[in-house]
Image: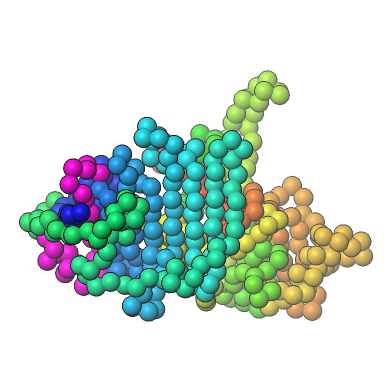
């Protein structure tokens, strides 16, 4: 079997065609420089590619997409280059099963299996039947070391990794399809082209606390940001702010910490109002929902937002829109003084979980009519914990706002997904 091999600057996902084909020499130069490029493998007489390899060493990434005869992606592999330059971690795989040739690519009814692997031996396998009843079955995969890692071939020596998938019984013979290298006058690649996986971006966090801004959460078509609601303050005498699920991290400490000046900081809720027709009342009503909670460290505007992480979190392992954050299985998070984490957590458990009637208001209080649920105070240190509700379980990223000088000015948790900004009207533009 003769396999044609072509190189290009990028791969257009929508048209399934290479963008700006390049010579093997230019591809070799880009590989050495760590710049993105793609390799396309084709068989004679077949319109769809067999597989496409997507390389960007500067992003520690090599991807592989396998296509069937109908041009549908059936399998993808995300490999990561970590500390050992000679091997790659098989970080993430996904496979789709199509009922027939007429089934659309990524049809929501198609069964899918995904596997996530980590260098420390952890992993997760998720089967999504997507048939009647839906649901997902999550297990821990049993993976050998040679299945978790693969050797990194030299440029031009990659095998056809999908040969078995396509039923090839004999080793393929590769034939390079040369292309004349194009100049840079054609500009950047179209938005439909592949790019290396990127972690989640912060989105318009600042705007969620700016009254008059119009947003949508995907469910309500139009919402208007109102004045942030202030719900007391949080004392952080240790200068180390904890943001965590109340069950803490793997080492029984808080999931995340952010260094701030010792002090007392205002707690806020970003809220938006919207109108809808209430069938029960038979008329239009207006409601207000909380989108995010914030510890306001300074009135100085945030110039940048960054995702908080732990010292052992490795950004090279994040997949597309991947996040670091705190984990909750009780739809609850908290801001707290990390210096008094253990006594504050004990008060939280006594008050909320055990309902201890002997806890006085000087150490524990419930908060009503707010996304913030309760406050606990360690009398020995003066440190406090304030718990807040989220809209579900899972992992929630923590966004740290910094001033132009790099100082922390705010710490934000979105209690649901990031709303999308709507175009400004004349009224909001002049606000």
Q: Residue at x 24, y 61 (%)?
A: 171
| Residue 35 falls within the magenta-colored stretch | yes
Quarter where residue 8 is shown: bottom left
Asked whether residue 367 is in view, the answer is: yes
Residue 247 sits above or below residue 312 on the image: above
Relative placement, left or right, of 273 versus 44 is right
Q: Which residue is at the far right?
A: 358
Where residue 362 sits in the image (x, y, percent)? 84, 67
Q: Nearer the viewer, residue 121 or 233?
A: 121
The quarter of the rendered structure image containing the C terminus is top left
Quarter where residue 298 is shown: bottom right
Q: Nearer the viewer, residue 227 or 104?
A: 104
Where residue 274 sits in the image (x, y, percent)? 58, 35
The quarter of the rendered structure image containing the N terminus is bottom left
Q: Residue at x 87, y 59 (%)?
A: 355
Give the residues drawn in magenta, as a range. 23-48
Where residue 235 sits in the image (x, y, percent)? 69, 70
């Amino acid at each position: 079997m003769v396999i044609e091999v072509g190189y290009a600057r990028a791969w257009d996902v929508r048209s399934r065609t290479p963008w700006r084909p390049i010579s093997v020499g230019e591809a070799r130069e880009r590989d050495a420089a760590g710049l993105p490029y793609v390799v396309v493998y084709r068989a004679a007489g077949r319109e769809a590619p067999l597989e496409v390899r997507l390389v960007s060493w500067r992003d520690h990434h090599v991807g592989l997409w396998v296509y069937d005869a109908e041009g549908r992606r059936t399998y993808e592999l995300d490999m990561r280059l970590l500390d050992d330059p000679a091997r790659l971690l098989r970080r993430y795989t996904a496979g789709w099963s199509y009922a027939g040739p007429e089934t659309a690519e990524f049809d929501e009814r198609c069964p899918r299996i995904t596997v996530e692997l980590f260098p420390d031996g952890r992993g997760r396998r998720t089967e999504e039947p997507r048939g009647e009843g839906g649901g997902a079955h999550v297990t821990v995969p049993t993976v050998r070391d040679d299945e978790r890692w693969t050797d990194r071939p030299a440029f031009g020596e990659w095998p056809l990794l999908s040969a078995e998938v396509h039923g090839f019984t004999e080793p393929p013979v590769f034939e390079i399809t040369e292309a004349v290298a194009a100049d840079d006058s054609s500009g950047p690649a179209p938005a439909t082209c592949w790019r290396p996986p990127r972690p989640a971006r912060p989105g318009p966090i600042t705007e969620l606390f700016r009254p008059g801004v119009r947003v949508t959460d995907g469910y309500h078509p139009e919402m208007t940001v109102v004045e942030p609601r202030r719900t007391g303050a949080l004392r952080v005498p240790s200068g180390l702010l904890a943001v965590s699920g109340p069950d803490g991290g793997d080492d029984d400490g808080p999931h995340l910490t952010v260094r701030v000046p010792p002090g007392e900081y205002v707690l806020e809720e970003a809220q938006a109002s919207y109108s809808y027709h209430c069938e029960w009342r038979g008329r239009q009503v207006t409601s207000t929902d909380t989108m995010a909670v914030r510890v306001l460290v300074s009135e100085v505007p945030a110039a940048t937002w960054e995702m908080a992480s732990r010292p052992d979190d490795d950004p090279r392992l994040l997949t597309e829109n991947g996040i670091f954050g705190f984990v909750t299985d009780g739809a609850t998070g908290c801001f707290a003084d990390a210096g008094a984490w253990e006594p504050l957590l004990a008060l939280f458990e006594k008050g909320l979980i055990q309902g201890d009637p002997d806890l006085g208001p000087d150490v524990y209080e419930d908060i009503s009519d707010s996304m913030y649920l309760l406050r606990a105070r360690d009398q020995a240190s003066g440190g406090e914990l304030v718990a807040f509700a989220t809209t579900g379980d899972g992992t929630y990223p923590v966004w740290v706002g910094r001033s132009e000088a790099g100082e922390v000015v705010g710490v934000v948790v979105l209690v649901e997904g990031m709303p999308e900004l709507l175009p400004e009207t004349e009224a909001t533009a002049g606000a």
